[in-house]
Image (cartoon, rainbow, N blue to C red):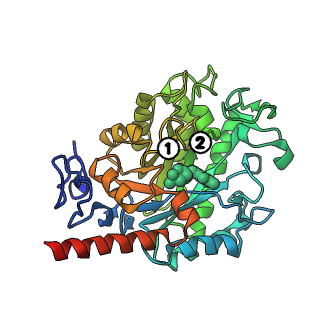
Amino acid sequence: MTEAWREAGTGAGGEAPEGAGPAGAPARGAVAASPLVARPLTLPRCGLTLRNRLVMVPVATAKADAAGGVTEALCEHYATRARGRHLGLVECEHHFVSPEGRANPHQASISRDSDVEGLRREAAALHDCDTPVLVQLSHAGSAASSALTGMRPIAPSERLAPGAKVGHELPRVMDAGDIGRVVEAFARAARRARLAGFDGVEVHAAHGYLLDQFFSPLTNLREDAYGGDVRGRLRITLEVVDAVRSELDGRMALSVRLGGCDYRPGGNEIEDGVRAARLLEEAGCDLVSVSGGMNYYTRIDTKEPGYFSDLSTPVRAAVGVPVVLAGGVRRIGDAERLLADGACDLVGVGRAILNNERWADVQWRRLERAHQDAGRRR
Ligand SMILES: Cc1cc2nc3c(=O)[nH]c(=O)nc-3n(C[C@H](O)[C@H](O)[C@H](O)COP(=O)(O)O)c2cc1C
């Protein structure tokens, strides 16, 4: 079934753009008269409207102060990238929800009520650029270290993620009390995000961090209700979604960044990611952002733009909420093609924007120029 909001949108099931090839994809080199990437999208559940389909996905900058407080440099980092008003949505980098879940020095904190004032400046930096903004909420689990946090890291099982540094300390296995405290920490962080004026939050459940450690069978060997099949391994994330939702107001968006597939023997496979995305939709998410799990955010076998599209395409077919796909997008034409192919509803861009603060402005100018040239040739 194609959702009504998607009918008006992109790719499979949607109207084909002018200049489209046989499957709705623009022929290589052709310029669609009405680019898919330029179409606005109103998130169907919460009503948040994005001016176009480009999302700046979370990329950690380590620009917070030593205590995790938001700095002017952090705000300016986002403002310079959004000032041209060419991004549909900005998702700010991972912020730690509790001290033992801190991944890095100079990572931003959303773990204390006193963080709200700085977070308000972070949200305002994007709103001053007319750009909606989510903040990413994260707990590093076993990827944290006692050298940084002063606490032994916690995790679903006494197992390190496959990419962990050799010799990294083994985590303490979480009991029911720890799980409840982590869920509560995400909920409190969501409340702070609301008080700070963000348009929503993204729960980080990818890239080998705590919620992904629960989801992956490579790191979750539990035999209780938080292990076992997909539903069991996703249980803590579903509880987080529920608790976070209760702290947001109805117009705020709730996204989950899902490490849907591990691309490693014995790990989650594409079907597991699809099943998880369905459960997240049922739990009330507004957006599912597809990325890697225990392989982190890259693939060793491909650097093709949209290199997680083998995962995002079936996820998009299975859920009725918008799907974000990031990975390897360098040009706006890459985004257009992924949308036309039905690989996603929104295209995430990370490193290209990190490395060039004018990326979105340059790319839109390029698109406009291509249009004018195509118009003159018609
Ligand atoms: C330096 C760096 C920091 C990152 N920090 C985060 C983060 O805080 N949260 C997150 O979900 N992903 C993070 N990512 C992953 C990106 O969001 C993105 O998925 C990845 O870079 C692939 O997209 P790209 O090819 O457009 O860069 C980070 C990536 C890089 C390179």
* 180 lies left or right of 374: right
Q: Report whether the residue tagged 1 is closer than 8 Å to ligand 1.
A: yes
Measured in 3D between alpha carbons, the distance from the residue under mark 1 to the one under mark 2, in whole angstroms, is: 8 Å
Q: Which mark is residue 291?
A: 1
Q: Which residue is mark 2?
A: 207
Q: Secondary structure at mark 1?
A: strand
Do the residues under discs 1 and 2 have CB atoms within 8 angstroms? yes
> In this orientation, does residue 245 appear?
no
Q: How far across and how far down the image is residue 2, in percent?
A: 22, 46
Q: Secondary structure at mark 2?
A: loop
What amino acid is at disc 1?
A: Ser
Q: Report whether the residue tagged 2 is closer than 8 Å to ligand 1.
A: yes
Q: Residue at x 39, y 37 (%)?
A: 310
Say above or below: 244 vs 177.
below
Q: Give the image quarter of residue 309.
A: top left
Q: Give the image quarter of residue 355.
A: bottom right
Furthest toward the left, the residue is: 378
> In this orientation, does residue 18 appear?
yes
Q: Residue at x 50, y 78 (%)?
A: 83
Q: Nearer the viewer, residue 318 or 355?
A: 355
What amino acid is at disc 2?
A: His
